């Protein structure tokens, strides 16, 4: 006789997440809404056993504090404008007082003034370019440098990118700033590697975040993505967040200076494929 014993209810199988970040302490910037990559990363990190601190600043600070309540465990939120060295130093001091050490940092910070986007590349003044570069690229170094003494060997720094190896429509000086962010990633990887600290960036596909809504013509940029990406793309930040968790984990202990694409494979395709999605693969 086969099958389950009579009278015993059939139970659904339980899928357990691997606890990749047990005991790790992470500083996460850029949480503004529950659709943001940073929020998804904070949630995934907590689900994998990490303890998390968030940062916010200005008018967004109250948003960050409100959204923090939606995480599995509500974390504290520290005030930090990354372009104000005194505030970055204050966060480093708060981390030192609270934990004494740090295992990972997520840099989810970017901004460009409106006249640095939307096809205005030739006419953008230096003042706007400077703001975009300082906030979106230089800020990675500005954030990490005061935290180096806190980052334990095996520590991991992760930033968020939008693949800047090519020129994009409408992205303009933000694209240039992202190219600079990729370069800053490599130079930090060079200088922090001897301390046992890894530095990587994640090139995500387009996700409809607050930052994305500030890019004129964002739909023009994002529209073809699902058609061209061989795995498809629905703008879910979850896969990006899980890749960030991997980079925070010891599984990535030999990965540094890297740009990791999480974009459905869009970056590897030369053009849109024929309209064959969903058909069976050819035999043989």
Image: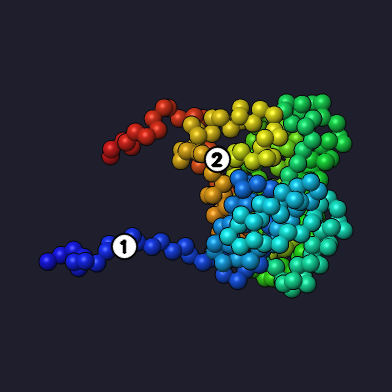
Query: In the rendered structure, are the residues bearing label 2 and label 1 in contact, judged by CB atoms less than 8 Å apart?
Result: no
Task: Give the secondary structure at mark 2.
Answer: loop
Q: Farthest residue toward the left? A: 1
Q: Identify residue for label 2.
A: 235
Which x, y percent locates residue 237?
Answer: 57, 46
Q: CA distance from mark 2 to mark 1?
A: 33 Å
Instruction: Determine crowd level at label 1: few under 14, some 14-19, many 20+ residues with C-alpha closer than 10 A.
Output: few
From the image, which quarter does the C terminus lie in?
top left
Q: Is residue 200 above or below residue 126?
A: below
Q: Farthest residue toward the front? A: 7
Task: Give the secondary structure at mark 1.
Answer: loop
From the viewer's perspective, is the residue at label 2 or at label 1 nearer? 1
* 230 horizontally vs 280: left or right: right
Query: Front-most of 188 and 150?
Result: 150
Instruction: Determine crowd level at label 2: few under 14, some 14-19, many 20+ residues with C-alpha closer than 10 A.
Output: many
Which x, y percent locates residue 103?
Answer: 66, 67
Q: Residue at x 79, y 62 (%)?
A: 91
Q: Residue 174: which disc?
A: none
Q: Identify residue for label 1.
A: 11
Q: Residue at x 61, y 38 (%)?
A: 208
Which x, y percent locates residue 275?
Answer: 41, 27
Q: Residue at x 66, y 27 (%)?
A: 217
Query: Front-most of 250 and 210?
Result: 210
From the image, which quarter does the N terminus lie in?
bottom left
């Amino acid at each position: 006789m086969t099958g389950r014993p009579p009278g015993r209810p059939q139970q659904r199988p339980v899928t357990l997440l691997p606890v990749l970040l047990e005991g790790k302490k992470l500083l996460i910037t850029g949480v503004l809404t529950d659709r943001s990559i940073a929020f998804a990363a904070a949630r995934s990190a907590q689900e994998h056993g990490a303890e998390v601190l968030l940062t916010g600043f200005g008018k967004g600070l109250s948003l960050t504090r409100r959204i923090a309540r939606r995480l599995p465990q509500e974390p504290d939120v520290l005030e930090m404008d990354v372009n104000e060295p005194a505030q970055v130093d204050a966060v480093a001091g708060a981390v030192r007082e609270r934990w004494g050490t740090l295992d990972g940092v997520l840099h989810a910070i970017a901004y460009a003034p409106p006249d640095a986007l939307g096809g205005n590349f030739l006419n953008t003044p230096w003042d706007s370019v400077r703001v975009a570069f300082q906030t979106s690229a230089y800020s990675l170094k500005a954030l990490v440098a005061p935290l180096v003494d806190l980052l334990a060997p095996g520590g991991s720094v992760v930033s968020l990118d939008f693949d800047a190896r090519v020129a994009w429509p409408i992205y303009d000086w933000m694209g240039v700033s992202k190219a600079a962010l990729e370069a800053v990633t490599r130079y930090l990887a060079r200088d922090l590697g001897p301390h046992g600290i890894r530095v990587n960036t994640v090139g995500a596909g387009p996700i409809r975040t607050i930052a994305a809504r500030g890019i004129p013509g964002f739909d023009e940029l994002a529209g073809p993505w699902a058609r061209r990406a061989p795995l498809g793309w629905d703008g879910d930040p979850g896969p990006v967040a899980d890749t960030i968790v991997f980079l925070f984990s010891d599984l990535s202990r030999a990965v540094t200076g890297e740009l990791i694409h999480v974009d459905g494979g869009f970056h590897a395709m030369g053009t849109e494929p024929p309209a064959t999605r969903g058909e069976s693969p050819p035999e043989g």
